[in-house]
Amino acid sequence: MSKTYTTINLRKEQTTTWITLDRPDKLNAINATMLQELSEALTIIEKDANVRCAIITGEGEKAFSAGADITELRKLTQKTAAEFSRKGQQVFSKLEVLSKPVVAAINGYALGGGLELALACDFRLASDNAELGFPEMKLGIIPGWGGTQRLAWTVGAAEAKRLIMLGDRVKAEEAYKMGLVDKVVSMGKMEAETEALAQRLGEYPPTALKYAKRAINSVTKSVLESGLKKETDLFARLFSTKETKERIEAFGSRETKKKETAKSE
Ligand code: COA
């Protein structure tokens, strides 16, 4: 019997499995259920010998994912924030070490946790309307699901500081120039281009691909492990500060304001 999910969709196309983040009304924001379901989907993909490649994308044309669900950040304390960080890191590390190649098909916004998810993939294609960035600083926090580490390894410390410390959001072309994505594709061609890449990967011997991935990942393995611990510690500490609480709350009040406006119309 196939598993039913509430926040993602799993679709098998020959030797490729598509994982679609499926909360389009919330720009595919990643909540605890989605993290859990992603983890379960990865276990299934890992075990299925017929699957040669996985693709992750977001439902709709607006967002891959606008990041961690901010409504879940509101109730965090220093202690629970550390658990929140570790949980996301574990799922994204599970993705990173999957024995099969994983492609992120970034169809629109990839912000915060959405970009952290994409950074844990092996390949990143971006639609021409994509915008990537880390808005965490505006909430008084730092990325806590591996973003501080994987971004710096992917584009270098200077660009990582610009994106994380200044909160600069980059469009697809700029992301390509800085090495954050491998290719920019028009939205209409995203599915076909991603499939074609998966197809190419699927033609190589799985064991050779698996070993190539493992060998390359070993470049960062030990530093990444200690960096992730540091990131969790620093992320969690911010949840004991007043500024952080206030800024996270402010996102909520913007939502409330919009709902009130809608009601009065
Ligand atoms: N967590 C929870 N909900 C989110 C979300 C997130 N990260 N990002 C977007 N949403 C929700 C919005 O609250 C809104 O829900 P509502 O219709 O029930 O009010 C819905 O998704 C659509 O978003 P909206 O803000 O109306 O779209 P927009 O086109 O005006 O703006 C963004 C798009 C991405 C710029 C904006 O949604 C945003 O800044 N999101 C937060 C990004 C962020 O800070 N991510 C990092 C979190 S650590």
Image (cartoon, rainbow, N blue to C red):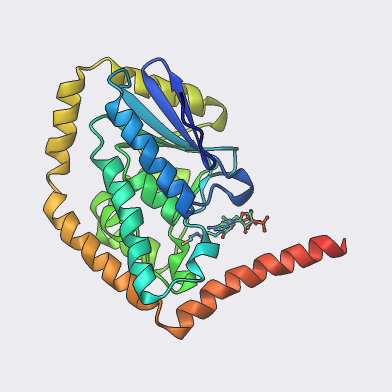
Residue 213 in the figure: left or right of residue 59: left
Query: Whole-percent x and y of residue 45?
Result: 33, 29
Is residue 230 something that shows in the picture? yes
Query: Which residue is pictured at 44% across the width and 50% down the height?
Result: 114
Is residue 162 something that shows in the picture? no
Q: Splitting the image into four quadrants, where does ligand 1 fall?
A: bottom right
Q: Which of 190 and 232 lies nearest the eye of the viewer?
A: 232
Q: Relative to 152, is 214 above or below?
A: above
Query: Which residue is pictured at 60% across the width and 37% down the height?
Result: 60
Residue 261 in the figure: left or right of residue 161: right
Query: Which residue is pictured at 49% across the width and 54% down the height?
Result: 31
Query: Whole-percent x and y of residue 59?
Result: 56, 37
- Tell me which corner region of the image, top left, top right, bottom left or bottom right, holds residue 208: top left
Q: Which of 2 and 86 lies nearest the eye of the viewer?
A: 2
- Tell me which corner region of the image, top left, top right, bottom left or bottom right, holds residue 123: top left
Query: Whole-percent x and y of residue 142?
Result: 37, 67
The quadrant the C terminus occupies is: bottom right
- Tell me which corner region of the image, top left, top right, bottom left or bottom right, holds residue 121: top left
- Point out the residue furthest to the bottom here: 242
Q: Relative to 248, is 61 above or below?
A: above
- Point out the residue furthest to the front here: 1
